[in-house]
Image (tube, helix red, strand yellow):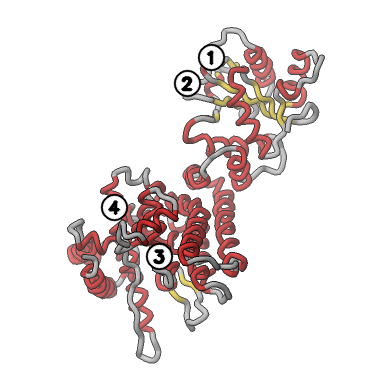
Amino acid sequence: MSQDEGKHVFVSYVHEDNTEVDKLCAVLEAAKIPYWRDRNSLGPGDAWKAKIREAIRGGSLVFLACFSDNSRAKEKSHMNEELTLAVEEYRKMPPGRTWLIPVRFDSDDVPEWDLGAGRTLSDLNYSDLFGEGYAAQAAALVTTVHGVMGQKQLGPAAALEAVEQATSADRADLLKKLTKEMLVDPTRRIELDDLVSQEVQRVLKAISDPDRVNKPFGGTGNEQMISLATQARELWELTKPFCASLQVAARWGSPDLLAPWTNGLRSFVQAPLKAQGGVTALLELRHLPGMVSLMTAGLAAGSARKWENLKALVADLSVRDRYEAKPQALLEATNPWAPFDHDGWTANILAKSELAAKPFDEALADFTENRVGKYHTPVGEWLHAILRPIFLDQWPDDDAYAAEFDRAEVVLGVLAQDAVNVRIAAATDGRGWGRSRWFGRSTWRSAHSYGNPVEDLQHELATEGALWGPLRAELFGGDLGRAQAAVEKYAESFAETARHRF
């Protein structure tokens, strides 16, 4: 979207950087930002110096100066001439105005151009459009440019859409980086709320779509299993950006800042509880976003020992089940097996495909042709694998990550058992039943000498008593006896489950 007339962004660069500038302009176009670029904006016969001078002085509301090794290596270039004109214009502007924005295509320094009043070009905030941070930096640049141009500012959600559309950026990685930037900036909290809410709506639209659960489900048994695995992966890919953002918020946020994520968690768990007709196995898959998000919250907050955040994200939330008279705790309303209750194969196919990097048909064939046996805890294996990239910055070491994953399974399991205990104690008819269903790979790992996170939790509680971190954060209602009862009951169920993992 180049244009000769009206207000625009002026892109200054050397022609050796055409490829990088093409990417930058693609982002601007996707964000509907008009730009002026010599290759597109000069017509045949134009007096190029005069046209460029006019574009800089007359219509440019933002000047992007793009630097790289190519530009630094040139002692003489048209870009230098453009930048000289830009500096002249910048010197006329009031202090603090954002107009001249350096852009780096590599990690070398921005040149020390004199801007007057003791300022140099390198003193200005610049945008780094290279490496892993490209997408987040591009989104931030787009948001800044919209604000400078006096238009209705493009929010971060729209900026994310524009950058994703124009690049091959991973949406989860981009959302994680934006969450890190915005969470610590009070002026951007509303924008962050909008950004997270957009992701929640994307997921809810998918799991509430009647066509998704009512579509024809024929074919052979193998074809049906592969179809279920495919839909499960699609739901995970939709939920992954929310989980990536949640990992940051649960680790670095505080309870008063967690509303966007708590609303998402509650909505994800609530949606599958609504009455809806369709194929049973497809209906059950609707539990997947809520279940995966709860595991993310438990792992992020629990491993960081942010117990107040864990309480806000997991323990304090409840939903309405059409079959229950009272609100139900999230950890009772869903569990790792809920998406796969009537299907013994999908989780195994997902786990094998993820761990062995195989297509679903080959993963299924490994089982049906007896090349491998089915997993003891396929859901846990799959969760452990798909969440690993999100937690790589928090736990670079695989063994440390595995241990924290085991612990998170157990912590969620104990909290689920506490919810069961509270429900039973409150039953008006004096009756009640149930137990935690949050068991995973930690059961077979404990049975094979990889450590026992339940015993570790019991030891912590016995040693620290009322000073135990979760109790001080008011988990288990801050009641020592209630915590002991939940841990003891869960330990019995865990030991029973582990005996079957040999």
Q: Which residue is mark 4?
A: 402
Q: Which residue is mark 3?
A: 345
Choose the circle earlier in sequence order: 3 or 1: 1
Choose the circle earlier in sequence order: 2 or 3: 2
Is disc 4 placed on a helix, strand or loop? Answer: helix
Q: Residues within 10 Å of mark 1 (few under 14, many from 20)?
A: some
Is disc 1 placed on a helix, strand or loop? Answer: helix
* Marks 1 and 2 close (CB-CB < 8 Å): yes
> Label 1 to label 2, Cα distance in Å?
9 Å
> Label 4 to label 2, Cα distance in Å?
38 Å
Q: Which three-letter amino acid code belongs to the residue tagged 4?
A: Ala
> Label 4 to label 3, Cα distance in Å?
24 Å
Q: Which three-letter amino acid code belongs to the residue tagged 2?
A: Asp
Foreground mark, 4 or 2? 4
Residue in the image at 51% along x and 76% along y: 320
> Label 4 to label 1, Cα distance in Å?
47 Å
Residue 480's place in the image compared with 357, above or below, is: below
Q: Which residue is mark 2?
A: 108
Q: Which three-letter amino acid code belongs to the residue tagged 3?
A: Trp
Residue 250's place in the image compared with 62, above or below, is: below
